[in-house]
Image (tube, rainbow, N blue to C red):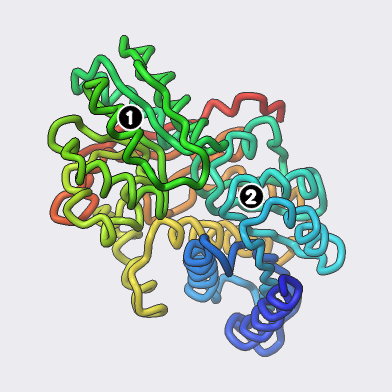
Amino acid sequence: MANKNNLRHLMFGLAGSALLLTPQAYANETIKIGVMLPFSGAYAALGSDGRNGLRLALKEHRERLHGSNIEFIEMDTEARPERAPEISSALLNRHKADFIVGPVHSGVANGMLRTLRNRDTIMIVPNAGSAEVTGALCAPNVFRTSFSSWQTSYPMGQVAADKGYKRVVTITWNYGMGRESVDAFEESFTAAGGEIIRKMLVPFPRTDFQSYISEIASLQPDAVFVFFAGSGAVQFALDYDALGLRERIPLIGSGFLTEGTLGAQGKAAEGLVTTLHYADELDNPNNVKFRELYKSEYNRDADLYAVQGYDAGLMIVEAIDQLQGKVKDRQAVIEVMRNMTVPSPRGDFTFSKAHNPIQNVYLREVKDGVNRVIDVAMPALEDPARGCNM
């Protein structure tokens, strides 16, 4: 079944690209973009949003493609790390993809990197926050348009200290992204004089949190830092509110606690404070234009995952434009990308030496069901890229 899904996406991608993204009838070169995202399973919506953003950028800027025919070769990762080597190898060796955009899941990213780093393609990571992507597994041909787990959690430690919190409990699922996120919070919070009085690790993907929340209530911390996303974020917020803690013990976290979850969380999310590199209502021209275009194209509101896919598309457009379609020279593409400023809806960003975004991280609070930007928690924040020898 997985192979059938992959083939279906491939044929759709090729047909759609040939019809939609050939700016002139006499395309002078075919540029292949492999898309490794989840199109089925729990993360299917995130994969769809990322693909939509990617395609929107190339359609919006088709006049800058120098007559190139763009082919999308779409592969469903199913968010299964064990599939990553097979699929990435197929895109690299069989399809000869010039660019490979993906994935969502950090475990899949690490599997892809073991196949694609230092190879004859350009890999752009539009979501996975694994520290290794721009850390121990960094490579010249690998870029990330999203975030590192450190970037989205480290600023909250200083925010918590500034709010006067001294004793904090942390809780997350026991998997890589969760552990990295709470470690980043702890790094900055303890450096500012705070104390982590209890570190709770919940078996992934368990969403029965009531016993943990009862223990939190007995510990009486000044605040609770949490990393959950998706269904876990929804259920934790609901349980926290139902047990009466929301108005007694402040709940803070990485922005994924309230990203794409507010509708399901309802009033349980009111007042929750998070840090993230994007918010829907950022008041800049690029964000306003992007959200209008996305709504017009897909009849739905854009989210963070669409932004990150869109920015991957902007990178590809810029490389094609500057090199006049001659993207087979991978070193030239790398030079263009590492020196570019990406005009993102989140705000302009550049790349670190490890090819991770140097970007603002915003302090947000849920008010009336919306993540409102309170301030910039940390401007132009650069990931430490620990273990990267590039």
2 or 1: mark nearer the eye: 1
Say whether residue 200 is left or right of residue 157.
right
Q: CA distance from mark 2 to mark 1?
A: 33 Å
Q: Which mark is residue 80?
A: none
Write the residue at 17% across / 43% down. Answer: 271
Name the element at disc 2.
helix
Say whether residue 183 is left or right of residue 6.
left
Image x and y of residue 185, in percent: 40, 26
Between 276 and 390, the one lying in front of the other is: 276
- Which badge, 2 or 1, comes first in the chain's sequence? 1
Amino acid type indicated by mark 1:
Met
Q: Which residue is mark 1?
A: 156
Corner quadrant of residue 212: top left
Q: Residues within 10 Å of mark 1 (few under 14, many from 20)?
A: many
Residue farthest along the top direction in this orientation = 193
Image x and y of residue 156, in percent: 33, 29
Name the element at disc 1.
helix
Indicate the quadrant containing the C terminus: top left, top right, bottom left or bottom right.
top right
Corner quadrant of residue 196: top left
Image x and y of residue 4, in percent: 73, 78
Q: Which residue is mark 2?
A: 336
Amino acid type indicated by mark 2:
Val
Image x and y of residue 118, in percent: 80, 43
Between 4 and 366, the one lying in front of the other is: 4
Say whether residue 265 is left or right of residue 318.
left
Residue farthest along the right direction in this orientation = 93
